[in-house]
Image (cartoon, rainbow, N blue to C red):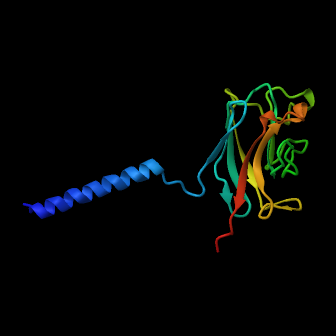
Amino acid sequence: MLSDKSKRCERYLRRVWRFLLALVLTLGVTPAHAAVSKDGSQGQTLTVSQSSVSGRKSVTVSGRGFDETVGIYLAFCKLPKSGAAPSPCGGGKNLAGIGDASFWISSNPPPYGANLAIAYLPGGRFSEEVTISEKIGKVDCRKTRCAITVRADHLREGDRTHDIFIPIKFTPKKK
């Protein structure tokens, strides 16, 4: 049988344990590589599987709630000044529609884009693996801010209302 002192100590430790558990659950433990989401002005949401990487890496980028009548470009680009389109961007599509750092997503592309654009999934959703690297051409993303970007496609070139940017931070490579 436990003494009164042992019982008090046990109750105290249980309270401390409950407090710490509640603190962790309330504050959350978010690793540096956790997914990051950002909402757009039209009610759409863009999510990147991780926003802090080292070296060349593929990240999963998904979206939901996008207007299926508006085509978009999903790409890894230099973060633009406010009101400007993102540029330069990595990747690009060739005539076979193959690319890994940029994607054209449209459910109603013009005839020339029928084999290049990726159709939205129901609900204005998409999910693509985007390859990012420390450099986009001559732009060093370790020194210049770069981001996963979404913008209206070339059919709405000047329409900035569909822009969403999630900055990517490059961390030193682990040895």
Residue 70 in the image: above or below residue 19 = above
Q: Position of residue 90 (x, y in %)?
A: 84, 52
Q: Residue at x 78, y 57 (%)?
A: 145
Q: Residue at x 75, y 53 (%)?
A: 131
Q: Nearer the viewer, residue 161 or 152?
A: 161
* The furthest residue to the bottom: 175
Residue 68 in the image: above or below residue 27 = above
Q: Position of residue 91 (x, y in %)?
A: 84, 50
Residue 158 in the image: above or below residue 6 = above
Q: Position of residue 134 (x, y in %)?
A: 78, 62
Q: Residue at x 72, y 55 (%)?
A: 168
* The furthest residue to the left: 1
Q: Quadrant of residue 54?
A: bottom right
Quarter holding the N terminus?
A: bottom left
Q: Position of residue 127 (x, y in %)?
A: 69, 40
Please tell me how many numbered marks the rendered image carries: 0
Quarter holding the C terminus?
A: bottom right
The answer to whether residue 32 is left or right of residue 6 is right
Q: Nearer the viewer, residue 27 or 166?
A: 27
Q: Residue at x 91, y 27 (%)?
A: 111
* The furthest residue to the front: 82
Q: Quadrant of residue 3?
A: bottom left
